[in-house]
Every structure is written in C-alpha cells, then in structure tokens.
Image (cartoon, rainbow, N blue to C red):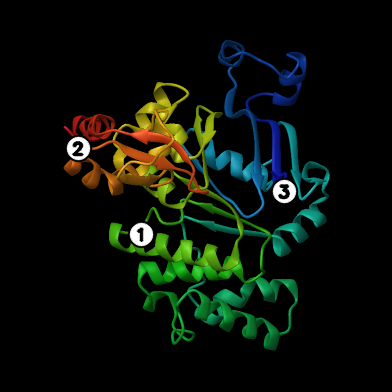
C-alpha cells in the first residue's frame, strides 16, 4: 500500500494561556499534568496535539464548544502562535516562516472559510470573489476571468452583479466558498461554515461541498460540532476534548470502538444500521461455498437487512474480489436494529 502524502503535520502542539507559558512548558519538560496546569493557573486551548492531514482528504475536527478545535486550526495556519510543538506544511517548518512568508502562504496556498461569511457589502458577487486575487496584484481582466469560472463552479451563474444583501444565506455562503477557492489553495480550512444556515439550506450546502470536492480533490480541514455533518463529509474524524485529540478514525471506527465515554456520547444517537458496514459485524464463514444470499462486506447493514430478515437465511459475505470472507445472520442484524431503537427511545 503506497504511503500517503502529508499536506500538514502537527506534532506535540500546545497553546497555553497564562503567564510566560513557554517557560512553564520548558520547566516541565513539555509534559505538564492537568494538575500542574490547574495549580499554575494555565488554560490549555490545545493540549499536546499531534495529527497528520493527508493530501486530498477531508479531515473533520469536532468537539463541544471550548474543546480546542478552532484553536488547533488557527495554530495550523499561525493565525495564533502555538506555545510549543512542530507544524510542517508541505514539508516546510511553518513555525520558522517569516511574517512575509506567512502572508504569501496564506494568499497563495491556504483557503479559509468561517462561520461569518464576511462578505464586503459594497462589492458585488464578482468583486467579492475576485478580491483575494486583487490583493495578490492579479490584473483585473485575469482575476475577473477566474472569478467567473468559480461562480459557475459554485452554481451562482447569473448573479455576478448581485450584492450580498440581495442573496439568500445559502447563496452568501457559496460566495464565501468561491472566494476562498479563487486562489486555488493547496489546503482548505473551514470553521463551522454551515452552522448559521437553516437545516434545509445546510444540507444543500453539504451536497454542494461534496460536489466541489469530487471535482477539485482538495485537502480539507473542516470544523463542526455536528456528528451527522461529520459522517456525511469526513474521510476521517478527529474528536477533541479539553484541548486534547482523544480519537481519530472514520465514523465506523468511532462508533464500533470509541476511545472513551466522551466519544461514545457523540455517537450514541447515530443509526448504526445506516452507518455500519457488513464487514464490521460479520462472523467467520463456516464454509467457503456461497449461500443463496450474497452481500458485499462494504454494503451498509440497512441495505441488506430486508432480504436477510425476510428470508431468515444466513448470507455469505464476499470481498472486492468476490471471495468469501464471512457470513451474516438475521440475529446479528436484529441486534443492530434493536440497538438503534433503544438509542432513539
């Protein structure tokens, strides 16, 4: 299996608030206990965090308010300075970059979208989207040409001359996404970009976001506190608690093997049957021959449940090559469905 390319890497990153936090960490060999922090009256916004973000993946960072997810992303971009640790972006030490180098990296390689759309009310859609290119010194003709391409990409064609006040919330968010894409960033940071939208528009924007990702294959760090949103969007999910990264994995891994009660609580109300794959609950096959019902190990439980339950038969599970790799019984499926009903009570 080829090694994944890392776009941004964080190792033992700390962000402490208090009196001379760098000295405090150094005096405790960069390994203070929670009790040390409390007694010395330091607040750990980010607590010894290490994580790699792979090229082309959507990494979702989630946690309750105050868990440190926004602080970690701001450390990744050096919008706030980490107290200690290492951050490498495309192989270069980001913490050694000068202010001038940082500005260039943010202008040309990083796209950022926040909860607040921050559109300029006196500029129309075209001008808002072209603004980052204007800052780069790109000619008016070229930046407007690029902006028109992005407008079409995000589904705003025909609204080039509209002002923000003339757009719906979802349309304003599309402008925010488009503006961040205008510079063709290598990595895209999104901090709860859809949380201010009503549920229907939010789902529409999630669909739009996935469509764009299928087209552009960006490296994305996406912050949310909504596990349903994380499931829809993420390749991997990092869950934070009190500044720590407590678990990283795909949604299925977090649900089937939560690291602690905090992670389990996040996943408690998620319908297992819609998320879990056959391979996550199958049992070893008692024979290599195929039964009447054959399912793939990547199928979701919800999709195979009706045929297995109605026939009351054991299903053979096959892998991508069609080889038998396990079996699935009616009782196993019923256990999952019953657990979902219990969680919803």
Quick check: can you spot residue 318?
Answer: yes
Foreground mark, 3 or 1, reads 3
* Label 1 Cα crowd, 10 Å radius (few <14 / some 14-19 / many 20+): some
Q: Secondary structure at mark 2?
A: loop
Q: Residue 236, image x and y in percent?
A: 53, 43
The earlier-in-sequence mark between 2 and 1 is: 1
Report if the CB atoms under discs 2 and 3 are less than 8 Å apart. Answer: no
Q: Please give the count of numbered marks on the rendered protein.
A: 3
Between the C-alphas of marks 3 and 1, the distance is 31 Å
Q: Quadrant of residue 343?
A: top left
Q: Secondary structure at mark 1?
A: helix
Q: Residue drawn at (22%, 33%), measured in percent from left and top?
A: 334
The residue at which mark 3 appears reads as 5
- Taking the image as shown, residue 329 lies to the left or right of residue 341, namely right
Q: Which mark is residue 312?
A: 2
Q: Quadrant of the C terminus?
A: top left
Q: Secondary structure at mark 3?
A: loop
The residue at which mark 1 appears reads as 202
Q: Residue 190, image x and y in percent?
A: 53, 54
Q: Is residue 198 above or below residue 84?
A: below
Q: Residue drawn at (63%, 25%), measured in percent from left and top?
A: 18
């Amino acid at each position: 299996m080829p090694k994944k390319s890392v776009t941004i890497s964080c190792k033992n990153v700390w962000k402490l608030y208090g009196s001379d936090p760098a000295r405090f960490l150094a005096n405790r060999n960069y390994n203070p206990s929670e009790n040390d922090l409390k007694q010395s009256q330091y607040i750990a916004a980010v607590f010894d965090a290490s994580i790699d973000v792979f090229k082309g993946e959507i990494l979702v960072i989630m946690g309750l308010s105050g868990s440190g997810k926004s602080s970690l992303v701001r450390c990744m971009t050096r919008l706030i300075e980490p107290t200690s640790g290492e951050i490498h972006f495309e192989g270069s030490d980001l913490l050694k970059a000068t202010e001038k180098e940082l500005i260039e990296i943010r202008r040309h390689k990083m796209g950022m979208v926040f909860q607040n759309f921050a559109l300029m009310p006196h500029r129309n859609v075209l001008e808002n989207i072209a603004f980052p290119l204007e800052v780069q010194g790109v000619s008016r003709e070229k930046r407007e040409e690029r902006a028109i391409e992005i407008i079409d990409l995000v589904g705003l064609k025909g609204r080039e001359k509209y002002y923000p006040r003339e757009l719906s919330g979802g349309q304003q968010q599309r402008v925010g996404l488009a503006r961040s894409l205008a510079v063709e960033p290598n990595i895209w940071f999104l901090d709860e970009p859809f949380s201010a939208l009503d549920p229907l528009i939010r789902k529409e924007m999630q669909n739009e976001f996935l469509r764009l990702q299928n087209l552009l294959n960006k490296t994305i760090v996406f912050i949310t506190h909504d596990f349903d949103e994380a499931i829809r969007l993420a390749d991997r999910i990092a869950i934070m608690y009190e500044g720590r990264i407590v678990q990283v994995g795909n949604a299925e891994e977090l649900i089937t093997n939560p690291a602690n009660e905090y992670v389990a609580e996040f996943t408690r109300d998620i319908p297992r049957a819609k998320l879990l794959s056959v391979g996550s609950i199958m049992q070893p096959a008692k024979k290599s021959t195929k039964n009447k019902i054959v399912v793939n190990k990547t199928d979701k439980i919800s999709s195979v449940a009706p045929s297995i339950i109605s026939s009351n038969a054991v299903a053979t599970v096959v892998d991508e090559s069609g080889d038998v790799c396990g079996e699935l019984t009616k009782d196993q499926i019923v256990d999952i469905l019953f657990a979902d009903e219990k969680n919803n009570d």
